[in-house]
Amino acid sequence: MQPIAYENASAEVRAVFDDIKRTRKVEDVNNFWKYLAHDPRMLKHVWESLKDMMGPGALDPLTKELIYVAVSITNGCDYCMASHTAGARQKWASEEMIREVYAVTGLANMTNRLANAYKVPVDEAFK
Amino acid sequence: MQPIAYENASAEVRAVFDDIKRTRKVEDVNNFWKYLAHDPRMLKHVWESLKDMMGPGALDPLTKELIYVAVSITNGCDYCMASHTAGARQKWASEEMIREVYAVTGLANMTNRLANAYKVPVDEAFK
Amino acid sequence: MQPIAYENASAEVRAVFDDIKRTRKVEDVNNFWKYLAHDPRMLKHVWESLKDMMGPGALDPLTKELIYVAVSITNGCDYCMASHTAGARQKWASEEMIREVYAVTGLANMTNRLANAYKVPVDEAFK
Amino acid sequence: MQPIAYENASAEVRAVFDDIKRTRKVEDVNNFWKYLAHDPRMLKHVWESLKDMMGPGALDPLTKELIYVAVSITNGCDYCMASHTAGARQKWASEEMIREVYAVTGLANMTNRLANAYKVPVDEAFK
Amino acid sequence: MQPIAYENASAEVRAVFDDIKRTRKVEDVNNFWKYLAHDPRMLKHVWESLKDMMGPGALDPLTKELIYVAVSITNGCDYCMASHTAGARQKWASEEMIREVYAVTGLANMTNRLANAYKVPVDEAFK
Amino acid sequence: MQPIAYENASAEVRAVFDDIKRTRKVEDVNNFWKYLAHDPRMLKHVWESLKDMMGPGALDPLTKELIYVAVSITNGCDYCMASHTAGARQKWASEEMIREVYAVTGLANMTNRLANAYKVPVDEAFK
């Protein structure tokens, strides 16, 4: 499958691309959106969900981006690690912060398996 | 396997338990540590890694705890979700913050698979 | 490891290759089989299982191929996504159908994590 | 966290619940929605995505439900396996069909790992 | 779904159950087989694959059982962790050996994510 | 991120590199360590854990390396599959042994999902 550039996109897709560019103040959308444009309905749903949930809220946008990086590492998604690490840097994450995300993600994946292996029952205090 | 309580623990295990209690200012250690105590060397390595990496650093301890929750959800580890959600609340996470972690984790797992499916190549700008 | 071509294969491996070619009406087997040929017993078990289960049954072969694509996306297996998407197209899947598989797979990975995160108990009606 | 019943739900949440009940012709919504109601924005996004994508399209709703089951098995999500297997039965899936989904899901998870292990390169024909 | 006991099984299923009992020298088969009996073809394929591959070979049966435990922990499969840990004990695994499997599995899951996160390129010496 | 070579490493990192080289009797450390060197604390924790746990114990070092390979295949970590397969060969694993690891890993991933799908309850004998 080839990416769909703005010039070749339908009006429906262009409307989403325009909203992404306006919201993120960028000149062009990332490859992710150009591929997802093959499915205009999902393009719209995914963008609307991300636009609504990834902005400022109870958590600041940088924290959300770091969580995104941690999940992408855990799932081994190369594109997602690259794009969200870039996103975190744009939101002024320092290299130290990014490395701490890596460290915590590694540790969590280890202790997740140790908890599985030992079949640790949930403490009363956590219920 | 049964949890190893302080009373029945070896000196080696007790030393780690004491350090956990002192560091976290708690009266007893969680089940995770009481089970991991069956392997005193791993108990020590895991505790020393967590003690060193989960405290204040480039990221604050709450952000790290939230990343831990996100990874644990992605891996479907019940114990880890419960213990780290409790940990986040102890570090004053609001319910809104926890729900945003859930939302971002859900979204990341969706877009991770869409990026895989469409084989999206990494944008030049992200390299 | 190098792929094992028909010319260099043992009689045992050739018998499986011949059966794959006959069953699938193809001139040569895919790389998957040429690598798995390093383990002739697994080659035979995997082929016999797939031959028996992936053909017509309660589900038509195209539906099974689409399920295969969905699992391969979830696991992030590049080879498997490529080969089974090709397989689906050979069984006359339209591009719209393939994109709907991608969409459903993305959504399922999201709601799987939300169900984990909220610890949703199974409804009585589903038991 | 407790489920949010219709009686206690905000107007925003009720509007989504009403739409689910109307669309699916059910008297009450499943637990999944009652828990997700803690996050009204995600409730709306997830429901709107599912309503739009899980209905008839290039794939029939039953095929989509079966794909959902396969992904949920792969991820080990108990709630999702239960609810989508129930959903498949409601859409007239036979027990034979459901068992074939299980079989294909098992096989796909096996061959995904064998393809990883042997580092099988993608065949030219699949590109 | 209910387990299928020997008394209620078809001749086809009984033949597999008999072979399992004879091969493993047990009086009854585990729940896994009684459930898989709902799909007699998969029952046969899975049993024949396991019978052939899990016995003595280049690796001894205990090593294979321990690998099985490690994969099951990584996937968070409760039944599989329980049944293969029991299998390992029957093959005379000591508690120390089982705990080392747990430790290695935890460590591997950590370093897998760190390698992902840092995008470590494969060393020339490993190719 | 670029790998950190010995010449450019801090004293803290060099001390770990020296210990790796001494312990493993190698002239240079693998890429994994050169990347992880960006986070000297994690470098130290990961190395100390591996040094302590991967050596001879209740399990021999080769068995541990094979378990590492199996987990890395399951997680789809390319670097880890390559480095630990190389590690296994260095510890005198035969090609037959490595292929049996692949086979068992594939089978375990299949039966893990079948156990999930059929919701097999744990046998009394395994508790």
Image (spheres, coloured by chain):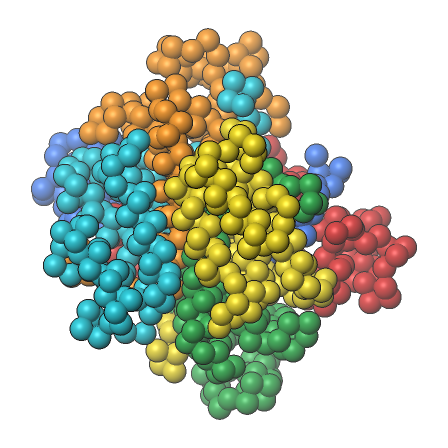
Chain colours: A red, B blue, C yellow, D green, E cyan, F orange
* Count of numbered labels shown in the rendering: 0
- Residue at the spot 42% in from the left edge and 46% down from the top edge: C44
The percent position of residue A82, horizontal first and vertical second, equals 64, 40
- Residue at the spot 90% in from the left edge and 55% down from the top edge: A7
Quadrant location of the C terminus of chain B in the rendered image: top right
The percent position of residue C9, horizontal first and vertical second, equals 50, 33
Q: Residue furthest left?
A: B8
- Of residues E108 and A101, the one drawn nearer to the viewer in this rendering: E108
Q: Is residue D75 visible?
A: no
The percent position of residue F14, horizontal first and vertical second, equals 46, 13
Question: Does residue A96 appear left or right of residue A86 in this picture?
Answer: left
Q: Compared to F86, does C54 lie above or below?
A: below
Q: Is residue E37 visible?
A: yes
Question: Does residue E59 appear left or right of residue D126 in this picture?
Answer: left
- Residue at the spot 49% in from the left edge and 91% down from the top edge: D27
The percent position of residue F19, horizontal first and vertical second, equals 38, 13
Question: Does residue E85 appear left or right of residue B123 in this picture?
Answer: left
Query: Can you tell which quarter of the image residue F100 is in?
Result: top left
- Of residues E114 and D103, the one drawn nearer to the viewer in this rendering: D103
- Residue at the spot 65% in from the left edge and 78% down from the top edge: D56
Q: Compared to D29, does E62 lie above or below?
A: above
Q: Residue furthest right?
A: A7
